[in-house]
């Protein structure tokens, strides 16, 4: 049986990004300030452009397997 693919919205709230990616609220705002992820304001609400979070994760160094 195939696992269903869940579409994630193009724009997501801070809380949605926290739930989906495990990035804290403070870290999200720091990444926005550093230009590492992008966001827009909709009134007083901040919406993160989710593709920029995915690109950020893709840019992180990969862990190498260790042998014991």
Image (cartoon, grey):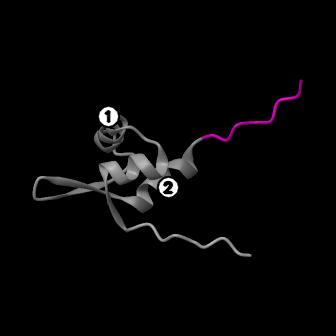
Which segment is the magenta one?
61-68
Up/down of 35 relative to 39, above or below: above
Count up the numbered dots: 2
Marks 2 and 1, the one that precedes in the sequence:
1
User: Residue 32 placed where, x, y %?
Assistant: 31, 44
Front residue of 47/20: it is 20
Mainly helix, strand or loop, the magenta region?
A: loop
* Mark drawn on residue 34: none
Crowdedness near tag 2: few (<14), some (14–19) or many (≥20) residues, C-alpha within 10 Å: few
Q: For this view, does 58 lie left or right of residue 37?
A: right
Front residue of 63/18: it is 18
The residue beneath circle 2 is 55
Q: For this view, does 47 lie left or right of residue 23?
A: left
- Residue 39: quadrant of the picture: bottom left
The residue beneath circle 1 is 26
User: Residue 57 placed where, x, y %?
Assistant: 53, 48
- Residue 24: quadrant of the picture: top left
Q: Which residue is depicted at the point 70% across and 37% down?
A: 63
Q: For this view, does 6 lie left or right of residue 42?
A: right
Specify the farthest residue to the bottom. 1
Q: Are marks 2 and 1 in contact (CB under 8 Å)?
A: no
User: Residue 44 placed where, x, y %?
Assistant: 11, 53
Specify the farthest residue to the left. 43
Crowdedness near tag 1: few (<14), some (14–19) or many (≥20) residues, C-alpha within 10 Å: few
User: Residue 15 placed where, x, y %?
Assistant: 33, 49
């Amino acid at each position: 049986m195939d696992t269903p693919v869940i579409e994630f919205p193009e724009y997501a709230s801070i809380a949605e990004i926290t739930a989906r990616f495990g990035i804290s609220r403070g870290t999200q705002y720091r990444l926005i300030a550093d230009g590492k992820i992008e966001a827009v304001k909709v009134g007083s609400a901040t919406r993160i452009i989710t593709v920029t979070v995915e690109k950020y994760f893709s840019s992180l160094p990969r862990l190498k397997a260790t042998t014991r």
